[in-house]
Amino acid sequence: MAPTPTLPAFDLVIFGATGDLAKRKLLPALFQRFIAGQVDSASRIIGSARDTLGSDGFRERVSAAITADAQGQSLEGFLSLVDYVAVDVSSESGWSDLKNRLQQFPDRVRIFYLAIGPALFARACQRIHDYGLDGPSSRVVVEKPIGHDLLSAQDINATLAKVFSEAQTYRIDHYLGKESVQNLLALRFGNALFEPLWNAARIDHVQITVAEELGVAGRAGYYDTAGALRDMVQNHLLQLLCFVAMEPPHSMNADVVRDEKLKVMRSLKPMSAEDVRQYTVRGQYRRGNLGDGSVPGYCEELGAESSRTETFVAMRAEIANWRWAGVPFYLRTGKRLPQRVSEIVVSFQPVRHSMFGPAAGPMTPNKLIIRLQPDEGVHLGLMIKEPGPGGLRLRSTALNMSFADTFAGSRQPEAYERLLMDVVRGNPTLFMRRDEVEAAWAWVDPILKAWAADPEPPKPYTAGTWGPSAAIALVERDGRTWHEELEHYS
Ligand code: BG6
């Protein structure tokens, strides 16, 4: 992997530092960047929450969060960057201490990571400002979901904008930090091969699947207020769709790239209530077998009699612009599906005329399969001749490229590693701009409304299956099928 230059020392304040996100993602990612030499050892990582832990107490937690990959020496070094200030975002408690701490380096890049509920954003931002902690070199970071509909997203964005300019605001969609997602840009725009074929004249349809084996145990409280459309489609899947469908940006400048994504969001064909009925499927998992045994159903995990929250969505979206008009984009995501897999499948038009005759067997249209996780790679489905005499039979096979083989020995960094360092560097290319987030909600809102008005609950599906049968019918009605496992391509 290319060497990573050390970035100038920075101060990062994590509000909500005792929470799950800090523990599972942020601190391990910072540690990895530290051992990679990217984090200057004069930088400070200041945890902040209501608990009166003290710096040593917090360091113990940090070391527990990263011991899995820590080597003694480096861990010691990393912990020397870590500090803690007890702050209550909802009151004045602790803010003067935080101010004293930050004042030591007034000119540094100063990052406020709001790993707290959106209901607290306004109070946090206001106090950051009232205590004079913000300035030209400060930045704020927030996580998806930004709101639960267009109105609430606009509210959150307006709240942040009272204190931080758009250029200082970093909205994380961690999918954009995944290597394989960035590789989509390289694949599309670093190769001359695909672009001439990348349009409605050559592409029959596109499928985007993000399937998970996990259920919602441990976060059912949040999940039940969100559901798969808000949790996954409004952000991750639509971001992937934008990367697939956008026009070539003329440079990697953050706003140039985000302008092109925004155009795609705004070209998504709005869905009427009737379209929602026809082109979307909601599901909710019931108890079933997955992996080594039986797993509980969604309501069992939630501890509720019933719920109208969807844990699965399949839909047929269309992009109403010159390049894509008429090409269906089938999106699918769900919990408790048979395997964890995220992939984008671009299916090309069939050959216009087959000279081979029926004895050669069926002709499978070419497919470009971009596997995002696990086993990241790119596969191109082609027709070839089966070996041997006795007539000419064709069969579909694939050119396979696996990242693990191509980059054997190099470590795949976690999404947060890249994203956190981009905040330090001041590069917002892989973060969602305000207008993008709002455009995504503007498209999703009518779907949410139509579902809310529908007396039918989500369709049940058994854990360990690919969702309700209606999701299969959704593509089969169009004479197509969901792309199946890669096995016959490997
Ligand atoms: C999060 C969602 O944004 O993404 C989770 O809130 C989901 O529900 C997760 O499990 C999936 O991320 P990944 O990186 O495991 O594909």
Image (spheres, grey):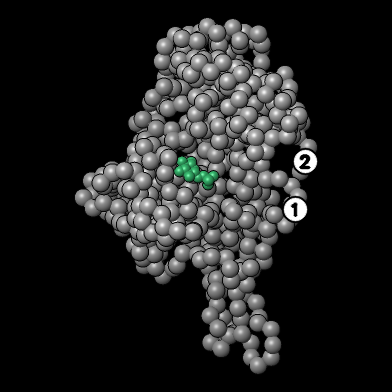
Reading the image, the residue beneath label 1 is: 408
Reading the image, the residue beneath label 2 is: 2
Residue 21 horizontal/vertical position (percent): 52, 33
Residue most toward the left?
Answer: 455
Please tell me in which quadrant of the rendered image residue 43 appears. Answer: top right
Residue at 26 percent across and 51 percent down: it is 457
Q: Which callout, 1 or 2, points to the residue nearer the camera?
A: 1
Please state which of residues 340 and 204 is positioned toward the viewer in this rendering: 340
Above or below for 309 versus 196: above
Residue 298 horizontal/vertical position (percent): 35, 49
Q: Is residue 411 left or right of residue 290?
A: right
Residue at 43 percent across and 40 percent down: it is 218
Question: In the image, is the residue at mark 1 within 8 Å of ligand 1 by its beta carbon?
Answer: no
Residue 360 horizontal/vertical position (percent): 58, 85
Q: Earlier in the sequence, mark 1 or mark 2?
A: 2
Please state which of residues 156 and 36 is positioned toward the viewer in this rendering: 36
Above or below for 471 versus 63: below
> Crowding near pointer 1: few (<14 within 10 Å), some, many (20+)?
few
